[in-house]
Image: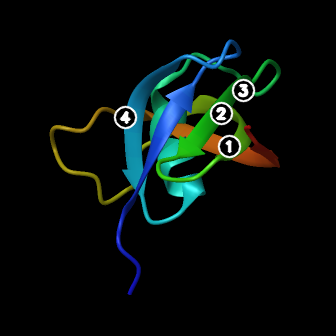
Amino acid sequence: MTDTRNFVLRDAEGNEHGVFTGKQPRQAALKAANRGTGTKSKPDVIRLRERGTKKVHVFKAWKQLVKAPKNKPEWMPDKISKPFVKKEKIETIE
């Protein structure tokens, strides 16, 4: 079994802001996308660098309001924010 990996959120200038964890880069990107403001027509670009490596995973990310599942708990609202990501490429930093 693989352990969780740490991914650092980078902006366009290369500054690193937050850490998201997941077994795969996509899982961390979904967590980051849920905090973003992107829409399907104008997605955010999320750049995640895996800690301990020089690989930067680049995703297009957005979130949409969707109906909550039928078996939702009482406290959950009728509409929830669902994140979506699409992997664009992997970059290597020097």
Disc 1 crowd, CA 10 A, few/some/many (<14, 14-19, 20+)? many
Quadrant in the picture for the N terminus: bottom left
Q: Please name the colour scheme applied to the rendered image.
A: rainbow
Marked residue nearer the N-terminal end (1 or 4): 1
Q: Tell me where residue 5 appears, x and y as whole percent.
A: 41, 59
Which residue is labeled 3 in the image?
45
Residue ID at (65%, 31%): 46
Q: Nearer the viewer, mark 4 or mark 2?
A: 2
38 shown above or below 3:
above
Marked residue nearer the N-terminal end (3 or 4): 3
Q: Are marks 2 and 1 in contact (CB under 8 Å)?
A: yes
Q: Are marks 3 and 2 in contact (CB under 8 Å)?
A: yes
Q: Nearer the viewer, mark 2 or mark 1?
A: 1
- Count all numbered tags in the image, as a single digit: 4
Residue ID at (75%, 46%): 86
Q: Tell me where residue 36 appears, x and y as whole percent.
A: 53, 21
Which residue is labeled 1 in the image?
56
Residue ID at (50%, 55%): 27
- Which amino acid is tagged 1? Val
Q: CA distance from mark 3 to mark 2?
A: 7 Å
- Which amino acid is tagged 4? Asp
